[in-house]
Amino acid sequence: MTTECLTDVCQIELDDAQEQALAAAAKALSHPARIRLLKILSQGQCLGSDLVSNLGLAQSTISEHLRILRKAGFIDAEVQHPRTCFSIKPEALTRYKALLEYLD
């Protein structure tokens, strides 16, 4: 199967803002542990301590991954002192799926 090479890439509509947003979201998802955290949280809320005990990673490592996911807007954290309950933000996943459609 042969495909023709593009000869006029100037006709492709580009959107810098969408590209930046997609790259930032992809960077936040670029580690397997973060994907696993999102998969777990997609099933319901979870205490940070439970995530640590079930993932087999150091508490500091889990905390860093959770921080990155929070900063990117994928998860929420509700402090229930002295614990923190994490939950996924479904609208963030919807937004990410929409950003991926930019590539179509």
Image (cartoon, rainbow, N blue to C red):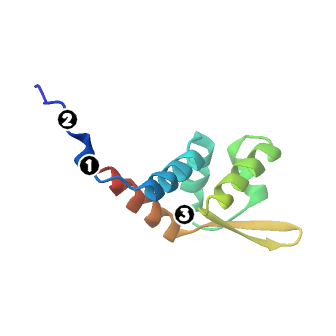
Q: What x and y, as percent, mark residue 70?
A: 67, 60
User: At 76% across and 58% down in the image, what residue appears?
Assistant: 48
Q: Quadrant of the N terminus?
A: top left
The amino acid on which the numbered mark 3 sits, given as a three-letter code, is Gln
User: At 51% across and 56% down in the image, what residue appears?
Assistant: 21
The amino acid on which the numbered mark 2 sits, given as a three-letter code, is Leu
Disc 1 or disc 3, which is closer to the eye?
Answer: 1
Q: What secondary structure is found at the residue carrying circle 1?
A: loop
- Residue to which mark 2 is pinned: 6
Query: Do residues under tags 1 and 3 come within 8 Å of each other at their CB atoms?
Result: no
Image vertical order of residue 2 relative to residue 39, above or below: above
Q: CA separation, marks 1 and 3?
A: 39 Å
The amino acid on which the numbered mark 1 sits, given as a three-letter code, is Ile
- Residue to which mark 1 is pinned: 12
User: At 68% across and 59% down in the image, what residue appears?
Assistant: 71
* Residue nearest the viewer, comparing 101 with 40: 101
Between disc 2 and disc 3, whose residue precedes?
2
- Residue to which mark 3 is pinned: 43
